[in-house]
Amino acid sequence: MTLASAQDHDVRWAQPTLALVRVPQRRGRPRTRLPQLTADKGYDSRAVRRWLRSRGTASCIPLRTYAHRHHRGRRPLAPRRLARQRWRVERSFAWLQQFRRLAVRWDHSLVAYHGFVTVACIVICLRKFP
C-alpha cells in the first residue's frame, strides 16, 4: 500500500506503487512483474500504459472521457476477461469508503491515516471473508 497527498495525481504514483508489488510463488522468490492489472480511470495515461506494456502486463484501465479525445475505431484497451473483473476494484473502494474516517480524512498525519487504512482492510477481511 502506498499513500500520498490528495493533491497528487494517481498517474504520478503508479510506477512507484507497482514497483513495490511482490506476488508470492509456490517456489522461489516472489514475482515482481504482474501478469495483469486492473485500475481505475486515474491511471489512464499513455506513459502508464507504455510502462505496463514494456513490463509485459495486460491492463484494464477505463478511459477518461474528454471532449477533445476521439476513440472511434480504436481497438479495445483490455481483454474482455480483465474488463469483466473490474467490479472487484470498484467494490473494494466502496468498502473502504464505508469508513467515515477514511472517506472524510480528518487525519493530517500520513502515518495515522495509513494505520486506519490498515485497520479498515483488516475489518473488511474479517467481515467479508470469515
Image (cartoon, helix red, strand yellow):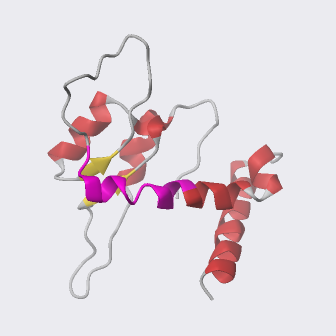
Tag count: 0
* Residue farthest toward the top in the current orientation of the protein: 68
Q: Position of residue 118 (x, y in %)?
A: 65, 67
Can residue 112 be seen at all in this image of the molecule? yes
Q: Is residue 7 above or below residue 129?
A: above
Q: Residue at x 62, y 30 (%)?
A: 7
Q: Is residue 41 left or right of residue 122?
A: left
Q: Quadrant of residue 130?
A: bottom right
Q: Is residue 32 left or right of residue 90?
A: left
Q: Quadrant of residue 91?
A: bottom right
Q: Position of residue 112 (x, y in %)?
A: 75, 56
Q: Residue at x 41, y 38 (%)?
A: 43
Q: Nearer the viewer, residue 55 or 103?
A: 103
Tell me which secondary structure the magenta stretch mostly adopts: helix
* Residue farthest toward the front in the current orientation of the protein: 73
Q: Residue at x 48, y 36 (%)?
A: 42
User: Magenta stretch containing residue 25, yes or no?
Assistant: no
User: Magenta stretch containing residue 84, yes or no?
Assistant: yes
Q: Is residue 110 above or below residue 28?
A: above
Q: Residue at x 28, y 49 (%)?
A: 59
Q: Is residue 78 above or below residue 49?
A: below
Q: Is residue 41 left or right of residue 60?
A: right
Q: Position of residue 47 (x, y in %)?
A: 28, 31
Q: From which residue to which does the magenta span run?
A: 78-90
Q: Position of residue 29 (x, y in %)?
A: 24, 78
Q: Nearer the viewer, residue 60 or 23?
A: 60
